[in-house]
Image: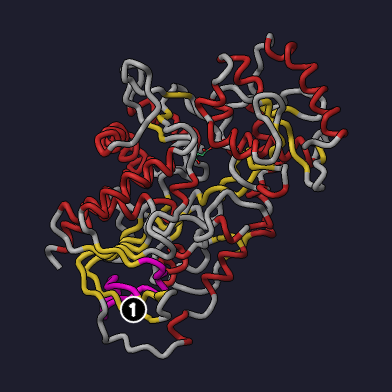
Amino acid sequence: MYTAQMKELIKKVEATRSERLGVQFERMTPQEKEEVLQENHPDYKEENFRELRLGKNKGDKVPLELADLIEAKSRLENINIDLSKTNYDVDVLIIGGGGAGTAAALEATKKGAKVLLATKLRFGDANTIMAEGGIQAADKPEDSPAKHYIDVMGGGHFTNIPELVEALVKDAPEVIKWLNDFGVMFDKENDGRMITTHGGGTSIKRMHAAADYTGAEIMRVLRDEAINRDIEVVEFSPAVELLLDDEGKAAGAVLYNLETEEYLIAKAKTVILATGGAGRLHYQGFPTSNHYGATADGLVLGYRAGAKLIFADTIQYHPTGVAYPPQIFGALVTEKVRSIGATPLNIDGEQFVYHLETRDVEASAIIRECQIRKKGIKTPSGVEGVWLDTPLIDMLHGEGTLEKRVPGMLRMYQKFGIDMRKEPILVYPTLHYQNGGILINEHGETNVENLYVAGETSGGVHGNNRLMGNSLLDILVFGRRAGAHAGEKSKNI
Ligand code: MEZ
């Protein structure tokens, strides 16, 4: 499948492998890291961001593409709709049918609340199912929530809101147990203990995974659970605008049913926004690992209702998106492959960054290697990338490791005639995650009364850089918290 030129380059990588295997790789110095962050972090290009001119929170800085959406005319101004009619009247309206929304629905119903879950696409079509590598939780004797806390704060350069991080790490072991009890098929040793691995920026092996389809596996069980509990779901019905009462409190939403082309009025005592991220806006022209529905809906709805944003100008570029072949350009190459040993290499076969740095440093180093140091590899489709030395995994851990631990990745490449066990793959950063979003407190509440946010639409937990595996954790911790709180609060409204 590879061209002759690429075969030559692969030979070069192979020639340096035995040398590299024997070397204790040095991490980048703090000075080098600083240089990388300042010079070449994709977020740092000022011209790609704008301060918002409208709304209660004008002045917030966001990517241009998001600013355009937020400042676009409200959909309600363009349609003739009777807002006094009622199609649904519930205690808790949840907008978004991914992991955060479903976790919220499960907890809200436990409180006795009447719930409606409105999804833009099918129930379960969400970034949750795109999360492959794992979920973090300090549940081993050698680990602790305190150690997890320090890693998260460090990864976020101490810009995270401490109370939110505390909630995240404290609930984490309980969340893993909750999932395990529901039947998530986590990777386990023969004696039943969960297998955990390292991730970028984590000091201890605390990433729990279900092969390389962790998010899809989690979504499978949560969705089944919601269906079994008869939670009401309306599919293909994105929210067009939030409804506020006379005092400016959240009171429901207008939904647009894509199948019947009807506007539906959903009245609610409390509303939870759980619409996920914004990758499909392709900020700065980047490809994305996100699903098709990730178009910043919740950020726009929330902002227009007066919700405060935080760090909405910080976006995470996953260091390893597919650079080649073009048919899967930008798709995720899960961090799990680096967790178990794959290392990024330049055209000379040199390792230019420690393979388990935090994502901002790792992605910046790859961009620097290609754009500044001119040591990237030009693919036949014209884009640049660096090698990710995947055959090293089987060399380090034994034949069959790739097959067992990342079967999805292996198949994805095999389809294009590329065998990750025998040849390295070409990668380049891909737009992956909205680090910030709507500011929440530890219950998922926003500054707009009765409006909650959970998951990637929220902001504050990760500061300006999220650690790997903390997204699946975040959606479940704060989905559960928001659902429980909103369910309880609805009793008194
Ligand atoms: O947390 C993530 O974004 C994650 C684990 C992604 C991945 O590399 O699989």
Residue 184 is situated, as x and y percent measured from the top left of the image, at: 33, 36
**Which residue is at a point 87% across and 33% down the rendered structure image?**
4
Residue 472 is situated, as x and y percent measured from the top left of the image, at: 41, 42
Q: Is residue 199 left or right of residue 416?
A: left
**Which residue is at a point 60% across and 14% down the rendered structure image?**
396
Residue 351 versus residue 51: which sits nearer the camera? Answer: 351
Residue 64, quarter of the rendered image: bottom right
Q: Amino acid at mark 1?
A: Leu
Q: Is residue 357 left or right of residue 253?
A: right
Judge whether residue 411 is colored magenta: no
Residue 322, quarter of the rendered image: top right
In the rendered image of this protein, does residue 379 appear above or below residue 8?
A: below
The answer to whether residue 357 is visible is: yes
Tell me, what colour scheme is on the image? secondary structure
The N terminus lies in which quarter of the figure? top right
In the rendered image of this protein, does residue 51 appear above or below residue 258?
A: above
Residue 35, quarter of the rendered image: top right
**Which residue is at a point 73% across and 27% down the rendered structure image?**
345
The C terminus lies in which quarter of the figure? bottom left
Magenta span of residues: 235-253
Residue occupied by mark 1: 264
Residue 452 versus residue 397: which sits nearer the camera? Answer: 397
**Which residue is at a point 33% across and 73% down the rendered structure image?**
253
Say few, some or many: other residues with alpha carbon within 10 Å of mark 1 (under 14 / 14 to 19 / 20 or more): many
Residue 408 is situated, as x and y percent measured from the top left of the image, at: 54, 36
Q: Is mark 1 within 8 Å of ligand 1?
A: no
